[in-house]
């Protein structure tokens, strides 16, 4: 099975930037890693909001996402990804394509803890 990478993003294209916060992104983009360092976008879904923190986590699981690249995430969705066994990587500021290339070159670190103090109020800024 090929790896499918989920990325919260500001736009739907590989040239768009990774969003600074998982739950507040404009889109969730899925990229399939093929072989020989090649990859292709396989989905982009608009983030129309969600009723709970697990809703986008389960959406990614249903789309067979194996890994997520994130720059900001609260504790509840972080724990949700651990529960559904989706690997989390700390992304860097920049485009989706840049982050995918860095993942392929083993330059992204595993995200071992939530990177936002709280996302329950949804009023913090990144």
Image (cartoon, rainbow, N blue to C red):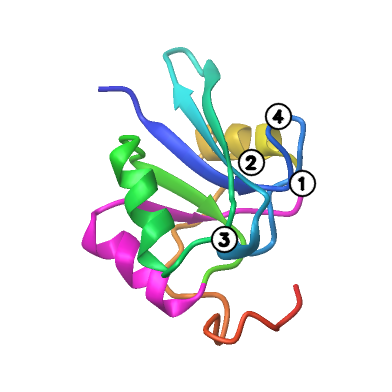
Q: Are the residues flagged by discs 1 and 3 in contact, CB closer than 8 Å?
A: no
Element type where label 2 sits in the image:
helix
Kindly state the secondary structure of the residue where label 3 is placed. Answer: helix
Q: Which residues are magenta?
A: 74-94
Name the disc covering residue 34, or none.
none
Packing grade of label 1 (10 A; few <14, some 14-19, many >=20) is: some
Residue at image mark 1: 94
Q: Are marks 2 and 1 in contact (CB under 8 Å)?
A: yes
Sequence order check, earlier mark of 2 and 1: 1
Where does residue 8 sit, x and y in percent of width and height? 59, 49
Residue 118 image offset from top left, x and y in percent:
54, 86
Q: Which numbered marker is on residue 99?
A: 2
**Which class describes the residues within 10 Å of circle 4: few (<14), some (14-19), or many (20+)?**
some
Q: Tell me the residue at 38%/56% (across/down).
A: 57
The nearer-to-camera label among 1 and 3 is 3
The residues bearing labels 4 and 3 have C-alpha atoms spaced at a distance of 17 Å
Q: Is residue 34 above or below residue 101?
A: above
Q: CA distance from mark 2 to mark 1?
A: 7 Å
Residue at image mark 4 = 13
In the rendered view of the protein, which quadrant contains the C terminus?
bottom right
Q: CA distance from mark 2 to mark 4?
A: 13 Å
């Amino acid at each position: 099975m090929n790896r499918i990478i989920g990325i919260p993003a500001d736009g739907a294209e590989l040239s768009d930037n990774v969003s600074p916060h998982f739950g507040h992104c404009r889109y969730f983009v899925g990229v399939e890693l093929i072989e020989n360092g090649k990859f292709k976008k396989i989905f982009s879904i608009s983030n129309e909001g969600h009723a709970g923190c697990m809703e986008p986590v389960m959406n990614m699981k249903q789309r067979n996402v194996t890994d997520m690249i994130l720059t900001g995430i609260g504790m509840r969705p972080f724990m949700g990804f651990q529960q559904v066994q989706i690997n989390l990587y700390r992304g860097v500021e920049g485009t989706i394509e840049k982050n995918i290339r860095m993942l392929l070159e083993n330059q992204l670190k595993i995200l071992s803890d939530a990177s936002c103090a709280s996302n329950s109020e949804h009023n913090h800024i990144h």
